[in-house]
Structures are given as C-alpha cells and as structure tokens.
Image (tube, rainbow, N blue to C red):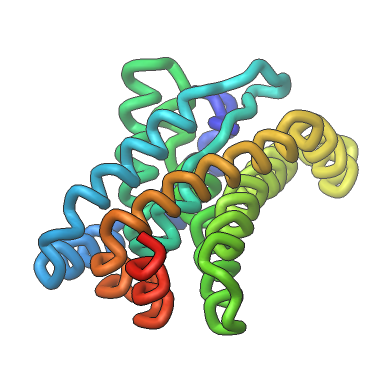
C-alpha cells in the first residue's frame, strides 16, 4: 500500500501532508493525556506500535507504485483511538521509508492519511458500533482489524486515482481496486484473525487496563476473569 518515493506529483504530496499533520499533532496530545492518566498502558502502546511495524513490513509485490501487506492498525485504533494510532503509524512509516525503502518521505503524508488515519478511523468506528450494540469484543476486534486494513487500500486507490485519473477517476479507481483486492481481502482476513488472538491474550492478561481505556465494559472484564 505504501506509495513509493517520488511517485506522486508534488502538489498531492503537499496536500496529503497538510491533511495528515494536524491529526498527528492531535494524536501526540492524546498520547500524553492517556499516558499521564494511565501510565500502566505504556507497554500496551509500545506493543501496538510494534504490531503495526511488523505487520506493515510484510509486503507482497504489486504494481503501479505500491504493494500489499497487512497494516496492523486495527489493534491500536481499538485500544487507543485513531488519533493515537496516526502517531504510531507515522513513526512506523518514517522508519520504513528511511531504513527499508518502503514508502517515501515525499509520499509520507499520503501514506499517513491512508494507513495511519482513514484505516484506523474505520476500525475504531466499527468496534464502537459493535460495542454499543452489545456485540462480543472478539467479533468487534475482528471486524475492526478487517475494515482498518481494507479501508487503507481503498484510500490508497483514491489517492492514486486522484493523482492519475486516466482515462477518468472512476476508471482509474476501479483498476487500482481490482489490483489491490486480489491480494488484500485474504490478507485482511488473516490480519483480523491474528489481531483477535493478540486481543484475546491482552483481554485475559490485563482486562483492567482495557476497562480503564474503555475498550471493554465491567461486565466483560468480570466474565473474562471468571473464565481465566
């Protein structure tokens, strides 16, 4: 999904930087607030960042200046919200651009918007919706991870189609989505299953932190403790 260095016209690079930077700045404020109120959540924050780094580094060959890989952002979005995840995503993307030639600095803003903002927002909304409806947390985390992954690629397809609307935006978007969909849907399912395993482990190990972060309610925490 990472759009490679130099692939976008400079006007679009600038535009996506302008969109991404305020969200990342707000995310930094949110991280300070959360870690001040819940210092015990710092290891979980580090795990969320590492999860994003590892999964989003597993790239598969693609064409048209991009690639396919899991994103890992659904977990962070559910635990800490999309703004915090945008900071984690930005840090990961900078390291990958500098050390792995995965993405680029000129396209960093665009990649932050797709993987660090839109995907996490989608995952966070899905989890909140299922939680509000009284659905099981594991179902919520599965669908959150799935849609966070998939919406990242939809956003990348939109970004590429806006920059290269040949012959039209709709035709370009269709072509980009077809290219991504072949590999991305099975990858999104696999990522969602892995995220469920990680989330279930965290829920059994430290349900108290998840309750403090308002990821799960007291009833769920009591059920988990009873099972464990």
Percent position (x, y) of residue 45? Answer: 26, 51
- At horizontal 66% and vertical 47% (from top left) the residue drawn is 150
Q: How many marks?
A: 0
Q: Is residue 146 visible?
A: yes
Percent position (x, y) of residue 80? Answer: 34, 62
Name the foreground residue: 86 vs 109: 86
Q: Quadrant of residue 62?
A: top right
Name the foreground residue: 21 vs 149: 149
Side of 68 relative to 84 (left or right) = right
- At horizontal 39% and vertical 53% (from top left) the residue drawn is 76
**Above or below, 180 relative to 61:** below
Side of 24 relative to 43 (left or right) = right
Percent position (x, y) of residue 134? Answer: 57, 82
**Above or below, 141 relative to 165:** below
Q: Quadrant of residue 29?
A: bottom left
Percent position (x, y) of residue 223? Answer: 41, 73
- At horizontal 48% and vertical 42% (from top left) the residue drawn is 72
Q: Quadrant of the C terminus?
A: bottom left
- At horizontal 38% and vertical 38% (from top left) the residue drawn is 51
Q: Quadrant of the N terminus?
A: top right
Q: Is residue 14 visible?
A: no
Name the foreground residue: 22 vs 227: 227
**Above or below, 150 relative to 27:** above
Name the foreground residue: 61 vs 94: 61
Side of 186 relative to 155 (left or right) = right
**Above or below, 224 relative to 101:** below
């Amino acid at each position: 999904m990472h759009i490679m260095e130099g692939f976008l016209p400079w006007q679009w690079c600038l535009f996506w930087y302008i969109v991404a930077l305020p969200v990342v700045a707000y995310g930094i404020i949110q991280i300070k607030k959360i870690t001040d109120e819940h210092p015990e959540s710092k290891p979980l924050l580090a795990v969320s960042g590492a999860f994003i780094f590892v999964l989003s580094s597993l790239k598969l060959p693609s064409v048209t200046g991009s690639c396919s890989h899991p994103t890992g952002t659904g977990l962070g979005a559910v635990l800490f919200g999309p703004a915090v995840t945008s900071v984690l995503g930005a840090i990961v993307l900078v390291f990958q651009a500098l050390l792995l030639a995965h993405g680029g600095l000129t396209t960093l803003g665009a990649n932050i918007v797709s993987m660090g903002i839109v995907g996490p927002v989608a995952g966070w909304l899905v989890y909140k919706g299922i939680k509000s409806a009284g659905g099981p947390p594991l179902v919520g985390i599965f669908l959150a991870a799935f849609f966070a992954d998939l919406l990242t690629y939809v956003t990348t397809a939109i970004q590429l189609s806006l920059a290269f609307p040949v012959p039209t935006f709709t035709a370009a978007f269709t072509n980009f989505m077809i290219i991504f969909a072949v590999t991305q849907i099975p990858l999104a399912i696999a990522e969602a299953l892995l995220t469920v395993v990680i989330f279930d482990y965290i829920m059994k190990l430290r349900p108290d932190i998840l309750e403090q972060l308002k990821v799960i309610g007291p009833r769920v925490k009591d059920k988990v403790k009873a099972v464990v």
